Image (cartoon, rainbow, N blue to C red):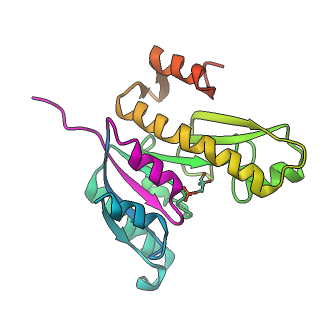
Amino acid sequence: MSTPPPTIAVLISGRGSNLRTLIAAQDGYTITEVLSNKADAGGLEFARKAGIATSVYPRSNFASVAEQKAAIFSRVAELNPTFCILAGFMMIVPQDVTARHPHWIVNIHPALLPALPGLHPHARAVAERHAEHGCTVHFVDAGIDTGPIIAQAAVPLLTGDTEESLAGRVLDREHELFPWVIQKLARREIRVISGNLEYSISARTEAYERNFRLPRYD
Ligand code: GRF
């Protein structure tokens, strides 16, 4: 009996450029639904055009943020995807969910974690004159941008960089890194064994060739 192909559910809140790259890169995994906490999230259009189911959970439909989040994550539980992907999803995941599923929710954060977690990382990188900046794909735990790092891509800061110029260069790297990580997770070339991340030789080789950083192999 053949095993069913890995599925992902993607959660968004905004323009959805990362979602768009995940849609384009659908190879080895299938996106079964795109969920948004904002009815006007631009990314929903990318999903609709690709014929992917969408569901929206606007704040005004719920008595509290807690109920809004509970509805989102109960739909994700119903979908039961291989991985739950946060692609610009601007809500904190409830702790009961992260506690139940330690290596299931995957987020992209536009900074080289553990540096610059939280909001406005590009502005802070410029203001604090960091030599380099970048993006991180990581599993989500109970903290904010604190979960186990899966892979990173760095960019140097250039003279005259602004928050916008830096964000643009980081976003280009996000669009390379994120689908690559999701494909590798789906194919089990990156996997978690007894709580530790393990990378296949080909994943390590490709990461080296594409200038991605893997936490245990640099
Ligand atoms: C990206 O920079 C991502 O790293 C962060 O939110 C932004 C979302 O952008 N978590 P988009 O909606 O994917 O274009």
The residue at the far top in this view is 201
The residue at the far front in this view is 49
User: Which residue is rendered at x = 58% and y = 26% of the image?
Assistant: 210
Which quarter shows the N terminus? Answer: top left
Which of these two is toward me, 80 or 134?
A: 134
Q: Position of residue 44 (x, y in %)?
A: 42, 66
Question: Does residue 217 appear in the picture of this structure?
Answer: yes
* In the depicted structure, whether residue 125 falls above or below residue 34: above
Q: Position of residue 8 (x, y in %)?
A: 35, 48
Q: How many marks?
A: 0
Q: Quadrant of ligand 1?
A: bottom right
| 172 relative position to 17: left or right | right
Which quarter shows the C terminus? Answer: top right
Which of these two is toward me, 65 or 25?
A: 25
Residue 84 belongs to magenta span: no
User: Which residue is rendered at x = 50% and y = 57% of the image?
Assistant: 95
Magenta part of the protein: which range?
Answer: 1-28
| 146 relative position to 163: left or right | left
* In the depicted structure, whether residue 64 falls above or below residue 101: below
Which of these two is toward me, 111 or 68?
A: 111
User: Which residue is rendered at x = 53% and y = 66% of the image?
Assistant: 14
Question: Does residue 86 appear in the picture of this structure?
Answer: no
User: Which residue is rendered at x = 74% and y = 53% of the image?
Assistant: 121
Q: Position of residue 154 (x, y in %)?
A: 70, 35
Q: Position of residue 202 (x, y in %)?
A: 45, 17
The residue at the far left in this view is 1
